Image (cartoon, rainbow, N blue to C red):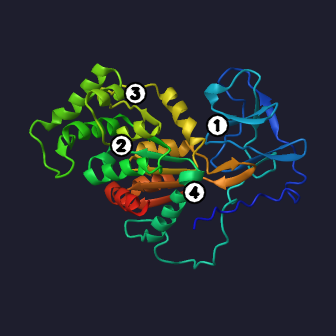
Amino acid sequence: MFEMPAYKAPDFSIEPFKSSRDARFEPVVAEGVAPHEFHATSIFPEYVKVEGNWILVEESRMDCVIVRTQNGFEVKEFRKLKRDDLVAVGRADDGSEGIYVHADGFLSRKSKEDAFAFRKGRTRESSYTLDYEMLYELLEYERDKGYIVWVAGPAVVFDHDSRSALEKLIRKGYVHALMAGNALAVHDLEASIFGTALGQDILHQERRRGGHYNHLDVINEARKYRSISLLMEEKKIKNGVVRACYDCGVPIVLAGSIRDDGPVPDTITDIISAQEQMREHTKRATTLICVATQLHSIAVGNMTPSYRVESGMVRPVFIYVVDISEFAVNKLKDRGSLAVKSIITNAQDFLVNLERRLA
């Protein structure tokens, strides 16, 4: 059975915390511009010393600043800073300047390791059996007690079995929010209408004559109806990832990119607006699963802290990144997050294995 890892808070009754100074705050002079030597937040739990007391910043994210409010602290992006906002300043994060970044709160006591050992990294040769077993237990727990956010690339709908597996996971309650780009929606709808993805049959992998027009026809039809939901109603679409999300009330955030065809309606083409909508879900996330989409994985991973505070208790946020490319999975892991688990495999194998084990 899944057991939530315990959080070990710092002992602020000992030195150097006990005698360190209070954090300094400087007012914003120009809107959207942080004071000189602002403190930039990380993905880890951070504590700020005010009037001799160390206080946890309960909701954080990477590369923002800490603003002192009447009720505590608020973490803000630079663009949201207003004149006279009081921003924490100081580049030391060891507590000496009243700010402490606690990176070891969830680390278990490890056995002594040899200085030299084989297979310390995660590669295509790694064994992932234990990772899968832990993920099965985690998702069963999180389905009812957490908030599972998926980040998916179009590869998940290029294959009949993986597309079906993700649809079933949505309908079984293992997806609470889905983030993707224009392409996932386009090719999922293409599969529903034509049985293809980029003109290739998703079941037999055969090229359809003239199939390269299929996704463009889908975009054109969706734009004619002005929304994805109306397109699905008019075309009587009953299957697929997008259909399952609409049926189950699972929010989808489609963030557009510079290379998009169309895009289909409901794709957010303003990057700030897209980021804001994505943050609404990442700040609630307790588990994040990124599959076969390098850029979206990095973007969402950078928005997601490694912890959440629930009912006064600090718990970890679990982050999984799945890709066939070692570079892609290690790119996100290089953020330094203790929470990231990387699985190097293709999207089809991952999703099918997951769906078959989860009731």
Rendered image: mark on residue 64: 1
Residue at numbered disc 3: 266
Badge 3 vs badge 2, beta-carbon distance below 8 Å? no
Q: CA separation, marks 4 and 3?
A: 31 Å
Q: Under tag 4, what secondary structure?
A: loop
For label 2, the crowd category at 10 Å Cα-Cα, with few meaning under 14, some 14 to 19 and many 20 or more, is many
Q: Nearer the viewer, mark 2 or mark 1?
A: 2
Identify the amino acid type marked 3. Asp
- Residue 269 position in % (x across, y down): 42, 26
For label 3, the crowd category at 10 Å Cα-Cα, with few meaning under 14, some 14 to 19 and many 20 or more, is some
Rendered image: mark on residue 310: none
Q: Quadrant of residue 264?
A: top left
Rendered image: mark on residue 241: 2
Identify the amino acid type marked 2. Val
Q: CA separation, marks 3 and 1?
A: 28 Å
Image point 34% across, 20% down: which residue? 226
Q: CA separation, marks 2 and 4?
A: 27 Å
Identify the amino acid type marked 1. Cys
Q: Under tag 1, what secondary structure?
A: loop
Quadrant where the image shows the C terminus: bottom left
Residue at numbered disc 4: 339
Q: Is residue 209 above or below residue 126?
A: above
Q: Nearer the viewer, mark 4 or mark 3?
A: 3
Q: Quadrant of residue 152?
A: top left
